[in-house]
Image (spheres, rainbow, N blue to C red):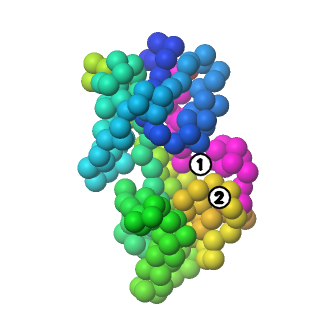
Amino acid sequence: MTRRFTGDQLVVATHNRGKLEEMEVLLGPFGIRLSSNADHNLPQPAETETTFVGNARIKAHAAAQATGLPALADDSGIEIAALNGAPGVYTADWAETPAGRDFDMAMSRAWAELDAIDAPEPRLARFCSTLVLAWPDGHDEVFAGTVSGRLVWPGRGTQGHGYDPMFQPDGYDMTFGEMDRWEKNKVSHRADAFAKLVAGCFA
């Protein structure tokens, strides 16, 4: 039996202001006051697991234990079919440089690795998002969402973030990088996971 959320405060276990804003829009109808790791001066815990759910659990439980409030965490990434699901949980790691994250470099690497194995078109991929809602008593609920599509090169558009410019979702002729942010949020992997979260814990 899924545990219902009955409080009026929720910590979103992120330092990403954009992600917090997305959650504020999605949870606004439920009258819940949201705060972030940054609001509580919480450090970012080390993401040492090899799965999306493992890393989301680390973040959610760390925030719940530190604040005494329920906490919601997301771990997400892109899985490229011809690369056996890579980069997957290492999606952000592919962009790491000494000067910060460079997703143009990460996208170039992904396409170069596909070229290196002469991967056929369409070069299929999917974005994955796993949401974990954790309570201070250690209980959690898990909801996973995906959106499938194909990769294009060169990337198109300056909206979104990460690998969005090279990902064209099924049924669209635009990449996530060309979509309006809020339009993308209706069809994204996170929207899929979030719809399941709302149905399970909030509706």
Q: Is residue 105 left or right of residue 174?
A: left
Q: Residues within 10 Å of mark 1 (few under 14, many from 20)?
A: many
Residue annotated with mark 1: 188
**SS at mark 1 in the image:** loop
Magenta residues span 178-202
Report the magenta stretch's main SS: helix
Residue annotated with mark 2: 176
Q: Work out whether residue 96 can be spotted.
A: yes
- x 40%, y 66%: residue: 98
Which quarter of the rendering shows the C terminus?
Answer: top right
Residue 171's tag is none
Which quarter of the rendering shows the N terminus?
Answer: top left
**Front-most of residues 146 and 7:** 7
Q: Quadrant of residue 190?
A: top right
Task: Name the amino acid, label 2.
Answer: Phe
Task: Name the amino acid, label 1.
Answer: Ser
